[in-house]
Image (cartoon, coloured by chain):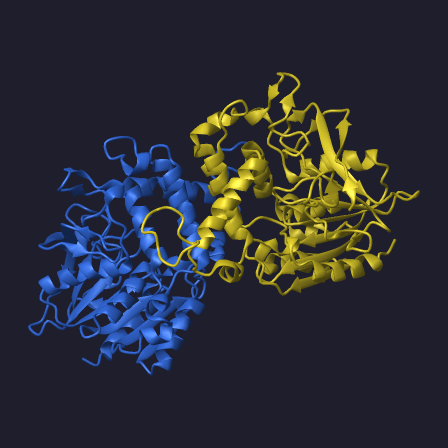
Chain colours: A yellow, B blue
């Protein structure tokens, strides 16, 4: 069992954000697996999704559950730690060690709450870049699923000379109106919770009901209808007949309630607001004039993976990206993996992903 | 301009519900358009969706907006009032004139609230049947979209000898796990609202925030991704750049907020709980052993219409119904209408629906 530890890097300069605001002090929580070579060019930066953290692989001392992408990271795995120096950091605004709204603002000695500046994926990558430089990395592969894929694209565009390979999984070059709508409902549930108290709840009861509802909505979008049917169908929870009341009747209701409850135990409602907002704002085409123009000057190789039953970030959105890259005559491989698992497939379909990613990294031009 | 009035019929006997409970007194709000013939066999009963009402067509005195299916009901329209006696009633448990949780319980002289018994689609139809008998109808066509389609099926199965034709639009013979999940989130938002107060809020502030969130979630499922994109894309509301705060940024957010707000002005949160529960419970296959067995003894003609971009009640669920009817050698016509409008298409795609329904009713065997 691989015991790993989260480390912390304090950035010794203020970060200027896309909004024009500044964060004075940012600490980044990160983990590394494997070793950086002398040239500093065998790094892989893993970029986590909405509610992920720096703990991608291995076990924390005393834990029985490994990191969120443990099946993908390690000796001989997709991200092979015998060859690569794998890095994962908690994103800016998160609540797992990196500075975010639940961190103490050194100027007030209280949690930031809603005084934390709104940030974008560009800002998230800006912070990651500081960490990567600190670690002595010269060249890297960036890889991420869902919101992690957005960060991977941003890396390729903002730091073209450093990024050799981009692995973009179950993601989108811009969030759809439907995606924004689902995020808006989640935020609305948090903002409507009387315990939200304008974001100042850290020494009080937390907006758990609102955050749980946000998670439930999100969770429905992470599964496909087929996956839900296979998992729950229309079975009642621990019984054969309906309750005829408003308690939990069906298994799927029990599952959602459980997802909501465990989420509030591990995640901060303010972080949820900020991170979903960053996702909403992400739009490569808008920033560069068009998706095609965005990639005109990039040199990285791209691997794009989507999943057939992902309706949150459907394959057609990946194909838009692939088409834009092909029109620029870039080196791009695309694979739509047939899977019933919906958006969550990037956290579940390890075998196929491993085969594809290994082969892609094996043919690395560097 | 056709001025119509809502009428009320008081059922003079208690209604025994599927749960085993009883409602002592039920008043049914209904409207009729056209005239019943002497034989009493030219009736069409329209069955409304989740938040509909008895006011399907024409104008209430002083109103500028007509009933919810006005484009489909009238002289020369799909449901032609020159030929047919068209009836629409507010469903049991609704909040538009028919007895529901916001009605006064004659035994306590207070609103029922959560003391209203939980009911099913079978119970809803049972109440409609009393109205139909009272009106002197002997034979009828039943037609409805979404939850209205469920009621139409229930009519065909429960009152086979009365039902000549079933028009089932954008509906499903049973709600999917995903559908239950979305309903559960909406109910959760209502139940979590501190103003909900265990359903006793009629003389206090109402659980408006919870009900608005329920409506927002619902509304996303009524539109297709394509429809949302066509309507809103990623445009900001009244501006060109992001707010960098948690107010309304995008047009789609403004639209959802508006949908939520107007809904709380016209709908009762308790009714929302009860009606979504009735939808969750609806499962013809479970009730009769299988979908195929369910229709073994029915004699009605069926017209099944689905919409290509409806992902709430997708075409495959209509096809299951069609297949079950065909295996029973029943008279069934099926049409999937190509439309980008999502589930809401049954309230929008009038031309195609009119053509299909007119032709179906024209070939009526009666």
Number of numbered callouts drawn: 0
Left or right relative to A258: residue B296? left
Q: Quadrant of the N terminus of chain B?
A: bottom left
Q: Residue at x 22, y 47 (%)?
A: B100
Q: Is residue A215 visible?
A: no
- Of B305 and A18, which appears nearest the observer? B305
Which image quadrant is residue B284 in? Answer: bottom left
Percent x, y of residue B182: 43, 51
Q: Residue at x 15, y 51 (%)?
A: B26
Location of residue A273 with respect to B90 vertically, above or below: above
Left or right relative to B270: residue A175? right
- Of A264 and A78, which appears nearest the observer? A264
Percent x, y of residue A177: 51, 49
Percent x, y of residue A275: 59, 38
Q: Residue at x 41, y 72 (%)?
A: B320
Q: Residue at x 67, y 25 (%)?
A: A23
Percent x, y of residue A248: 40, 48
Q: Quadrant of the C terminus of chain B?
A: bottom left
Farthest residue in the right direction?
A: A38
- Of A194 and B68, which appears nearest the observer? A194
- Of A205 and A302, which appears nearest the observer? A205
Which image quadrant is residue A276 in? Answer: top right
Q: Is residue B290 visible?
A: yes
């Amino acid at each position: 069992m691989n015991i790993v530890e989260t480390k912390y890097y304090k950035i010794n300069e203020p970060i200027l954000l896309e909004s024009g605001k500044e964060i004075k002090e940012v600490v980044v929580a990160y983990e590394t697996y494997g070793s950086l070579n002398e040239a500093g060019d065998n790094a892989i930066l893993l970029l986590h999704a909405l509610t992920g953290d720096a703990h991608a692989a291995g076990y924390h001392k005393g834990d029985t559950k490994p990191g969120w992408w443990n099946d993908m990271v390690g000796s001989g795995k997709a991200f092979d730690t015998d060859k690569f120096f794998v890095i994962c950091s908690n994103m800016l605004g998160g609540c797992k060690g990196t500075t975010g709204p639940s961190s103490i603002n050194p100027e007030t000695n209280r949690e930031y709450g809603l005084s934390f500046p709104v940030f974008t994926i560009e800002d998230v990558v800006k912070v990651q870049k500081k960490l990567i430089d600190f670690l002595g990395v010269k060249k890297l592969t960036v890889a991420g699923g869902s919101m992690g894929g957005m960060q991977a694209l941003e890396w390729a565009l903002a730091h073209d000379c450093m990024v050799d390979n981009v692995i973009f999984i179950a993601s989108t070059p811009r969030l759809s109106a439907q995606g924004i709508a689902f995020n808006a409902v989640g935020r609305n549930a948090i903002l409507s919770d009387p315990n939200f108290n304008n974001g100042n709840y850290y020494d009080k009861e937390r907006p758990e009901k609102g955050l749980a509802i946000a998670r439930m909505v999100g969770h429905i979008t992470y599964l496909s209808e087929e996956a839900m049917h296979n998992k729950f169908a229309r079975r009642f929870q621990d019984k054969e007949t309906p309750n005829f009341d408003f308690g939990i009747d069906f298994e799927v209701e029990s599952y959602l309630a459980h997802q909501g409850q465990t989420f509030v135990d591990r995640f901060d409602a303010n972080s949820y607001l900020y991170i979903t907002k960053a996702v909403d704002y992400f739009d490569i085409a808008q920033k560069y004039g068009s998706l095609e123009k965005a990639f005109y000057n990039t040199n990285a190789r791209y691997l794009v993976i989507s999943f057939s039953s992902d309706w949150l970030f459907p394959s057609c959105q990946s194909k838009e990206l692939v088409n834009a890259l092909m029109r620029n005559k870039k080196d791009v491989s695309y694979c739509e993996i047939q899977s019933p698992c919906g958006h969550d497939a990037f956290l579940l379909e390890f075998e196929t992903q491993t085969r594809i990613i290994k082969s892609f990294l094996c043919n690395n031009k560097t």
